[in-house]
Image (tube, rainbow, N blue to C red):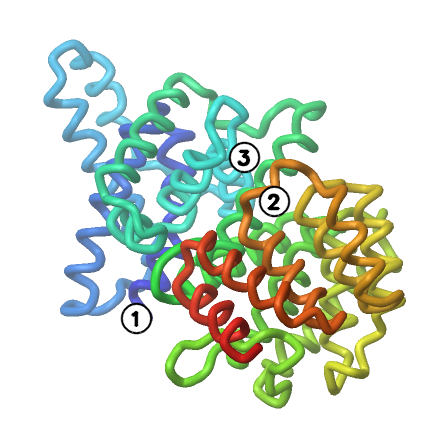
């Protein structure tokens, strides 16, 4: 496990220097994967070398040169490259940021950005990514292949200054997607895919180290920490979902809450406020309540109103409606549900929120039917079991 974690940490630090030196992201990424595979087989037996990063760069460089030697059309290029010394390790900070932005190139779809980021920056194998998302390995392989083909000829460098804010926003969005899929799996038998949420936190920590003054990077890291802190209390021993109001808060990760709370508090004082910071602030309010009934819903509603102005979206609207119901009563929330985005019409989350508010209002029959409808619409078995149990309880 220690070797596996080290390899994932070193993956972008190895790929960056190779792409910078040889070009051709696709071929260099293949060479790095071969070097990582060799290390995973040799290091547990022979021990981790004194300078593991240099070891990987050397092995990957040799793999890349071997490929060049086999290509007759590139003999001249191979001779000039082979005659030069192996590249010195470049600063990992610059390479990691450049790699993240390259993997989140606007020419790629969000699904391809996620897969390529996990492969090239996270160091996960194609099989590991496929298992995490519960899709065939061939599907992930195709996404990665198409992504690398679209990046063929792309320059390994930070984008121009005027493009960097939008590219960073894409990076944050990809990390957010990875974390959310790990924290609440969209399908399958398990509520969590811990390897994904843990990888998202690791990569966001890395990005935070590179951009310590960026408020939204700090906000996203704080949001992940405060949210993931609840994970030990989100399921029972048999994997059944436990909703937030019913969770045993003594099981929450106190150290993660302390780190996330301090991070968002300091960031809000020093950086322009953005959507991830506002979401982290909402998570912090939940974390500060010793009991569910102590939750400051008025403050949460105010934060959701600010967030909806800054980054409107249908799911955010649903969360705000829940906050409205908690402050002003379920009848007010139910009235607002009639005007939500039509895109949510068939989403299980809309039916689940309606069921919850109907239950709070005392309409047991309608609440039971809404819970059953929500259960039919979700592809997550833990969520489905929970929703059906709520219907049966009524």
Q: Position of residue 206 (x, y in %)?
A: 55, 54
Task: Say if residue 266 shows up in the picture.
Answer: no
Query: Relative to 273, is 104 above or below?
Result: above
Q: Can you identify the residue that label 2 sits on?
A: 172
Q: Residue drawn 29% across and 54% down?
A: 131
Q: Residue drawn 74% across and 50% down?
A: 337
Q: Position of residue 327 (x, y in %)?
A: 87, 67
Q: Tell me how far mark 1 sits from mark 3, CA to CA.
A: 28 Å
**Whether label 1 touches label 2, CB < 8 Å:** no
Give whichever of discs 1 and 2 has the lower sequence position.
1
Q: Can you identify the residue that label 1 sits on?
A: 1
Q: Where is residue 236 in the image (x, y as percent from the top left)?
A: 45, 83
Q: Nearer the viewer, mark 1 or mark 2?
A: 2
Q: Residue 144 carries which label?
A: none
Q: Position of residue 313 (x, y in %)?
A: 70, 41
Quarter of the figure with residue 1? bottom left
Task: Say if residue 165 shows up in the picture.
Answer: yes
Q: Closest to the observer: 310 or 55?
A: 310
Q: Can you identify the residue that label 3 sits on?
A: 101
Q: Closest to the observer: 67 or 118?
A: 118
Of all residues shown, which one is farthest toward the bottom? 250
Query: Relative to 103, is 46 above or below?
Result: below
């Amino acid at each position: 496990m220690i070797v596996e974690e080290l390899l994932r940490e070193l993956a972008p630090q190895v790929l960056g220097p190779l792409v910078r030196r040889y070009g051709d992201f696709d071929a260099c990424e293949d060479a790095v994967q071969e070097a990582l595979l060799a290390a995973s087989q040799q290091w547990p037996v022979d021990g981790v070398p004194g300078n593991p990063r240099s070891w990987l760069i050397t092995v990957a460089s040799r793999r890349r040169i071997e490929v060049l030697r086999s290509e007759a059309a590139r003999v001249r290029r191979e001779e000039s490259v082979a005659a030069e010394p192996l590249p010195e390790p470049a600063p990992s900070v610059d390479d990691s940021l450049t790699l993240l932005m390259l993997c989140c190139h606007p020419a790629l779809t969000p699904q391809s950005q996620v897969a390529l980021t996990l492969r090239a920056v996270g160091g996960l194998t194609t099989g590991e990514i496929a298992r995490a998302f519960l899709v065939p390995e061939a599907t992930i392989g195709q996404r990665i292949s198409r992504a690398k083909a679209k990046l063929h000829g792309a320059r390994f460098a930070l984008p121009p200054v005027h493009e960097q804010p939008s590219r960073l926003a894409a990076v944050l969005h990809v990390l957010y997607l990875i974390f959310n899929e790990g924290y609440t799996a969209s399908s399958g038998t398990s509520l969590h895919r811990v390897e994904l949420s843990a990888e998202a936190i690791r990569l966001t920590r890395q990005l935070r180290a590179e951009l310590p003054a960026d408020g939204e990077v700090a906000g996203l890291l704080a949001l992940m920490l405060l949210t993931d802190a609840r994970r030990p209390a989100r399921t029972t021993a048999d994997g059944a979902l436990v909703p937030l109001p019913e969770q045993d808060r003594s099981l929450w990760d106190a150290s993660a809450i302390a780190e996330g709370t301090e991070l968002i508090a300091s960031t809000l004082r020093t950086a322009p406020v953005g959507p991830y910071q506002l979401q982290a602030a909402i998570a912090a309010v939940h974390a500060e309540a010793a009991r569910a009934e102590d939750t400051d819903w008025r403050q949460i509603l105010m934060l959701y109103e600010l967030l909806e102005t800054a980054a409107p979206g249908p799911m955010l609207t649903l969360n705000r409606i829940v906050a409205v119901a908690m402050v002003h009563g379920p009848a007010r929330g139910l009235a607002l549900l009639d005007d939500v985005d039509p895109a949510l019409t068939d989403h299980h989350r809309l039916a689940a929120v309606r069921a919850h508010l109907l239950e709070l209002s005392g309409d047991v029959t309608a609440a039971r039917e809404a819970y059953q409808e929500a259960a039919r619409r979700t592809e997550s078995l833990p969520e489905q079991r929970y929703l059906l149990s709520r219907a049966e309880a009524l």
